[in-house]
Image (cartoon, rainbow, N blue to C red):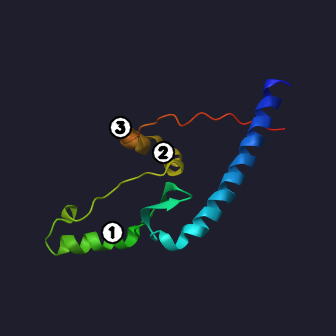
Amino acid sequence: MNQLERRSALISQIKTLQEEVETIDEKILAELADKVKSQGSTTVDYEGRKVTVTIPMTVKWDQGLLRDIRNKIMQGGDNPDDFMEAKYNVKEVAYKNWPEPLQKVFLPARTITPGKTRLEVKG
């Protein structure tokens, strides 16, 4: 068996094992549903062992409404930075389509870092 065939076989095994673990987790979570909080971490006894179930909370803020609130705070004479932080971002697709003089203005604020290297085999 060559390296790519071995790799493919291992990935298949990993996927099968991940699916099996997910099935087991779903059964355990169903059994513990009435014992855990709806969000955050809860540690319970299960089959003689301590098990911690964590249900993360994701909060998203409506950027348009926050901008309006920021403006109202400034109009009221207060500093919105006392209550919130602003995050600036430039979409890479837009940046690449800008004329070069505009790109040069933003270039000092732009940093490129490599992402995680992936190996994908097709066919």
Please, what is the three-letter code of the amino acid marked with disc 2?
A: Pro
Please, what is the three-letter code of the amino acid marked with disc 1?
A: Arg
Q: Quadrant of residue 72?
A: bottom left
Q: Is label 1 in a helix, a strand or a loop? A: helix
- Residue 70 vs 19, above or below: the answer is below
Q: Which residue is mark 1?
A: 67
Q: Residue at x 33, y 70 (%)?
A: 66
Q: Which residue is mark 3?
A: 108
In front: 46, or 108? 46
Q: Residue furthest left?
A: 77
Of tags 3 and 1, the one toward the viewer is 1
Residue 123 x %, y %: 84, 38
Residue 79 x %, y %: 17, 65
- Residue 5 vs 61, above or below: the answer is above
Q: Which residue is mark 2?
A: 99
In front: 62, or 109? 62
Spatial CA distance of label 3 from label 2 is 16 Å
Q: Is label 2 in a helix, a strand or a loop? A: loop
Spatial CA distance of label 3 from label 1 is 25 Å
- Residue 49 vs 83, above or below: the answer is above
